[in-house]
Amino acid sequence: MTAFRAAFGCTLVVLVASLATACGSSTVPGSASLDISLPDGSELAEVNYEITGNGIEPIVGAIPVASLGSTISALVSGIPANPGYLLDLSATSDAGTECAGSSNFDIAAGETTLVAVTLQCRAVDGDGDVVVEGGINQCPTIDSFVVFPLSVQLGTPINVQSVASDLDGDTLTFAWTADVGFFAAPASADTEFNCTQAGPAILTLTVDDGNGCTDDKSTTVNCTAAAVCGNGSVEPGEACDDGNTVGGDGCSADCGKVEVCGDGQVDEGEVCDDGNTQAGDGCSADCSTVEGCGNGTVEGAEECDDGNTTPGDGCSGACTIEICGNGTVDAGEECDDGNSIPDDACANDCTVFDPNAACNACREVNCRNFNGADVIDECENATGVATAGPAAGSLISDLCLAYVTCARTTGCGAGPEEECYCGAGVPINTCLINGGAGVCQAEAEAAGESTDAITVAERFVDPAFALGNASRLLRCDRQFCATECL
């Protein structure tokens, strides 16, 4: 049979004075009682043992030592007699203190071997380790911080703008804060601040790179109470304050402007204001009257003003004196050329001068029934269009008047009208052979609807054609109205 006892190392608490406690010493079995406590105040509940060697199956077990009077001792039997065994003891206190010890021994047949083992106890290290891994983060920078204006009335926003950068390229966040008031968009780089009470307000911008580093800037703005119009004191935002809210007395009803004639704004008490105090430009010098034709007052460039803009009553709608010869066609006038020449385009009575007036008057008397026909009407008001010739498709009335006008204005109509076609002094036979060469050849061929000389000659006397009607009207002129028409 084998028995072993063990002594503690330097950490053993000796409760019985007779017990030796030198480090590494062994204790002799006896009647002493031990309370297995360690210097750190912790206690052992059990001690584990393991016997190995010589190829035996390890012998393991636990020695309970929690009870008062327990010792670290045990008797183990059944070990083969051989040298070279190893005894390992281990224990852990309730505070985590670890104890261990070992000793070699031999077994002799029929004998009990005493094995002394010293347990070395080591308290748990209360300190820990830390691994430091360093890195570099570039903090953000507020590059621009703009606040304007620095003083406003309540209700007027203050603009705030900022620019920030981060050399690491981190995404930056913006945060605007204020001790009073509020921001329209506090997370934006640019926004507006609104005062909520009169007095100073501290505005702060904080820029964060998301890695625990920030930059901030602050400034103070001033908010003033809104101006009160009519209190007699000109306050910020007011142009004037005359102690009332009545307009037209030099200061507008809202105290927003000084009222004065000539400022370009129609204030109370003003009828007009053209931006100056000059008369004759549409608004009187005192801004009390709209200057214009028809107001009954001759102003500026007006020649007259009869209180209306009705023409034909001596003063025109443009307030010029209505009189023939003033160069303006007034009511009742056909023309007005500004002179008194009787036979130009406009007669002295301001009617359109008609050089054919005498001719037409004579024709009215003598040509309405010429040889049983109204040759004026049959020429001027003939119906139908030419169906052939160089002017096919033209109105017969136009072709007739064109030939009559040519014969009258060139003078060839004073003689036989064939001369207008053939030419002065050209025998008729030559004309019929060679064709017309007169000053009105083209008008004759158009009115006769042919370029053939014989055909044209025949149609001079054919009232079915414009040339025949023109020839009859010219014959009436030669007989009765040569002086007036030819």
Image (cartoon, grey):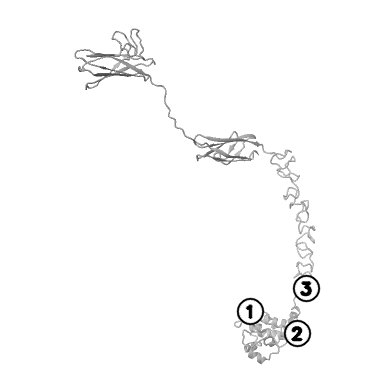
Which residue is at the front of the view, 472 or 252? 252
Membership of 358 in magenta stretch = no
- Mark nearer the N terminus (2 vs 3): 3
Q: Amino acid at mark 2?
A: Ala
Q: Amino acid at mark 3?
A: Ala
Mark number displayed over residue 395? 1
Residue 368, given in percent of the width and then of the height, sits at 71, 83
Looking at the rendering, which quadrant does residue 185 occupy? top right
User: In the rendered structure, are the residues bearing label 3 and label 1 in contact, judged by CB atoms less than 8 Å apart?
Assistant: no
Looking at the rendering, which quadrant does residue 49 occupy? top left
Q: Can see residue 93?
A: no
Mark number displayed over residue 347? 3
Q: Which residue is mark 2?
A: 482
Residue 355, given in percent of the width and then of the height, sits at 75, 77
Position of 472 with respect to 26 (left or right) is right
Q: Can see residue 135?
A: yes
Q: CA distance from mark 2 to mark 3?
A: 24 Å
Can you say whether 327 is above or below 464 in the image? above
Position of 363 with respect to 11 (left or right) is right
Find the magenta span and give its range: 482-486
Looking at the rendering, which quadrant does residue 198 occupy? top right
